[in-house]
Image (cartoon, coloured by chain):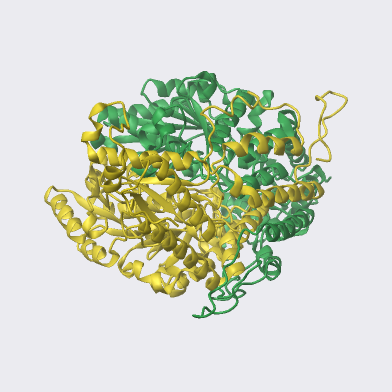
Chain colours: A yellow, B green
Amino acid sequence: MKTLNLNPQTQSDPPRIINPLDPEEFKRQGYMMIDFLADYYGNVGKYPVLSNVEPGYLKKLLPSTAPLGPEPIESILKDVKEHIIPGITHWMSPNYYGYFPSSSSIAGFVGEMLSTGFGAVGFNWISSPAATELESIVMDWLGQVLMLPKPFLFSSNGNGGGVLLGTTCEAFLCTLVAARDKKLSQVGTHNIGKLVVYGSDQTHSSLQKAAQIAGINPKNYRAIKTKRSSSFALSPDSLLSTILLDVENGLIPCFLCATVGTTGTTAIDPVGSLCNVAKDYGIWVHVDAAYAGAVCICPEFRYCIDGVEHANSFSFNAHKWFLTNLACCCLWVKDHTALTNSLSTNPHYLRNKASESKKVIDYKDWQITLSRKFNSLKLWLVLRSYGVDNLRNFLRHHVEMAKTFEGLVRLDRRFEVVVPRNFSMVCFRIAPTAVANGLPNGTKFDPIGKILNDKHYLVNEVNRKLFDSINSSGRVYMTQSEIEGDFVIRCAIGATLTEENHVIMAWKLVQEHANSLLGAFKNINCTSI
Amino acid sequence: MKTLNLNPQTQSDPPRIINPLDPEEFKRQGYMMIDFLADYYGNVGKYPVLSNVEPGYLKKLLPSTAPLGPEPIESILKDVKEHIIPGITHWMSPNYYGYFPSSSSIAGFVGEMLSTGFGAVGFNWISSPAATELESIVMDWLGQVLMLPKPFLFSSNGNGGGVLLGTTCEAFLCTLVAARDKKLSQVGTHNIGKLVVYGSDQTHSSLQKAAQIAGINPKNYRAIKTKRSSSFALSPDSLLSTILLDVENGLIPCFLCATVGTTGTTAIDPVGSLCNVAKDYGIWVHVDAAYAGAVCICPEFRYCIDGVEHANSFSFNAHKWFLTNLACCCLWVKDHTALTNSLSTNPHYLRNKASESKKVIDYKDWQITLSRKFNSLKLWLVLRSYGVDNLRNFLRHHVEMAKTFEGLVRLDRRFEVVVPRNFSMVCFRIAPTAVANGLPNGTKFDPIGKILNDKHYLVNEVNRKLFDSINSSGRVYMTQSEIEGDFVIRCAIGATLTEENHVIMAWKLVQEHANSLLGAFKNINCTSI
């Protein structure tokens, strides 16, 4: 800062005022931060992926009150290195395979810089026309690349179009509220307690949360059971029988979420057949492709969202697997008036001629919040900096690496791939046979004596121990899933820096930890890599 | 990019894969963007503040489809300069006085860079412990600086604490859902249609929207009328009589929003007295100090939130007037279990030992969405880089500039300050007397002949024309308010780059445009500056 006030205010000596956007200081600190992050990306593969700090660690390291005087950026960055980085779980690490990874790229990063730097708040058109217009253009670009049906695009000149939200939770909530109010306009507001929301037991928990927020009676949320025999996809027959029972009980079907690429196992719900069931009951169908939507830009994966032409809305997260930094959820709707009927506000302090002309979009009426960043910049930069062909190949490369990992799992007969791999995520575990064969007599995994009699529990415990063991090593981070009661390890490939050598290393690590966990495996024909 | 794929994929020549986080390329583009933005801050005062593009301008300038191949950052930045910047309404301009400004600083910007760069998604503690812990620490720091009562702080070891959300709309929705479910747990879920939400006619429109989203019957939203005689603050008597009528009609009072610094006129609701009324009916009281909360860090303004000790929750936007780049809404609650009871999810893929130990906070259960950025970094950097004393003086400086502007308005007898100035915003207009005296005979402002007989309409039209005229000049941007049917111009000082000379220039501009609008003012004793 050029002018920092280091003295208390006095009558004779008025306080000097800081200049928090001085261009020269901006450059100095900006370069410093770029260098810091470039260095971080160069070294992030060496850090323990999963932070191993204890709860409350940071409170012991930082002061308990805010400083009264200024501190130089150098001291702050020192604290970031010494105190913050050890407490970060490194989502940017090439060895990160947890949850679904958080996507990132130079284009996404510098796009975010531009958006943050302009500080434009694009709630309505007039508040920054470029923010609204670029968003509409980019959503049409991306919609075309995804081969979304024309009614979802602005260029069809109907009621369709796309909007950038933060996360899928917001996409759920916005479309659910729109569906709710559309239905209530037919059946009366007093019937809110009768509305039913449908998903499967594999649908993301955010749907249930959105239903709760929207005032849907918690008893009217249906997590319809899926089966291994149909690869954990939601069966249209199950949907129909659930609906029929609800209707018989005087309830009112309202909203269905079909998922393409579930969080647990990347299962693919049959969008078209589900829409077919839903349409007879006037149910709004939302297609949630939060993770897998990205790869549907590749023609060979586009079939996964077939049937979307019969749905009401579709969303995917560009921040999951599309090189666009968090947060960036892309939502398209066929009829935006359903959204705006529920979400519009028109206070006097926001009125303006452009809005009154009805020639412009005011995105505030397509979302929960009023304020919004110029988020289309980062998506625009990603699409232009890399181009659609490179993006396709980049995603295919992740799928190839997942195939490699899957192949390695299958080569080791101690392990099993638990569900068929659809995209870039592999669900695996130590197989029950290996647990039974490989254990030295008398092994106990818990103080409770009955364990060895409960094989299912034991298999889960062995896998849980393998999971804890590989994650505690700090050399990879994977997260878990539960499939029909089985504890399963998920290896989700999608971190930007991950290369094939990391994936092979990850598998070797899993094997090493399995070796020491399971002991000698002389009886088992185990192919090592 | 080191390795861009410029060739279509062939069997013999596998596609080269881009490296979207190459550290050297990251540096090159990062520096370029820093230079670009430093230049922008150096020149933003010269741009027309309000963009003057026509609806649909950008569609004519950009391709209608996404590029298949990559484009260099230089071409993209050229387009940003030539096509995007003309379409931006420059919230960062020193001549920006619209809505409430969007705050920004070097510390906020580099903090956002760090958060974006780490890409850590801190939905639960384990997913990045530092993100959760720094947030709790910084929220306690800021809570102490605001002299929030201890029950709002983590350090009290009760159920209180703070969380960073995106916007006030989210703070409304989270607390409203918590209040709704708490009430429904007493009266039964089937009574959702009877719950009533209270605000004033000055409360931000986001409250009504949040109520709509949360499934509150739209008929049960009360915008209680305020009066000029009480400076547009919500009167406890009016609140009480509204509640009594609702209770008489079998409705159930649930939630009240008290505002400190309303959007229309920066009115201050009497928090303590309102809480006193609310407590007898078990109403959750949220204090919304979105704009004015920041300045309450100055002891001389702290009285504005007196009574907050009796409220359930309090929020302000650090992105409005606290040098923290969008988005950053700070919410404190006394009882976080009310939030987590409504907003918790616990799917198998998120389970972990730290959460099960109950020794950590999982902020996903304090907010609408699951994913969340490491937003406390930017607030931490703002507090440390500037220090509390400098922040206080910076805000005081804005208030002083608003006093200057107010003084200039009062010196010109053609104008009036419409409501008392409380903080850094001045509501003014051309006074009815000036309109009556200053108009040449026969002046018409509309093709409809009756206008000159409708003085109220005429005064509004004159002010609307002044408003359009100054904003069309591109030299300032102010927005409007409506006070008891009067059209009023709001001059909200708070853009980071605004200095006293800009404020004086802004007033001169208003006078110039008033001169040419009102014609010769020989009869009026008008003091010019």
Residue, x 42% and y 45% (percent of image)? Answer: A479
In the figure, A46 relative to A159: above or below? above
- Residue B91 visible, this angle: no
Q: Nearer the viewer, residue B42 or A263?
A: A263
In the figure, B3 relative to A38: above or below? below
Q: Is residue A307 left or right of residue B518?
A: left
- Residue B277 visible, this angle: yes
Quadrant, the C terminus of chain B? top right
In the figure, B500 relative to B92: above or below? above
In the figure, A191 relative to B80: above or below? above
Q: Nearer the viewer, residue B303 or B153?
A: B153
Q: Residue B6: x percent and y percent?
A: 60, 77
Q: Nearer the viewer, residue A444 or A53?
A: A444
In the image as oriented, which residue stretches furthest toward the left?
A: A248
Quadrant in the picture for residue A485: top left
Q: Residue B61: x percent and y percent?
A: 62, 74
Q: Is residue B344 left or right of residue B388?
A: left
Residue, x 81% and y 31% (percent of image)? Answer: A5
Quadrant in the picture for residue A18: top right
Residue, x 61% and y 42% (percent of image)? Answer: B319
Q: Is residue B248 left or right of residue B229?
A: left
Q: How many marks?
A: 0
Quadrant in the picture for residue A453: top left
Quadrant, the N terminus of chain B? bottom right
Q: Nearer the viewer, residue A61 or A73?
A: A61
Q: Residue A57: x percent and y percent?
A: 56, 28
Q: Is residue B462 left or right of residue B351?
A: right
In the image as oriented, which residue stretches furthest toward the right?
A: A12
Q: Residue A117: x percent and y percent?
A: 68, 53
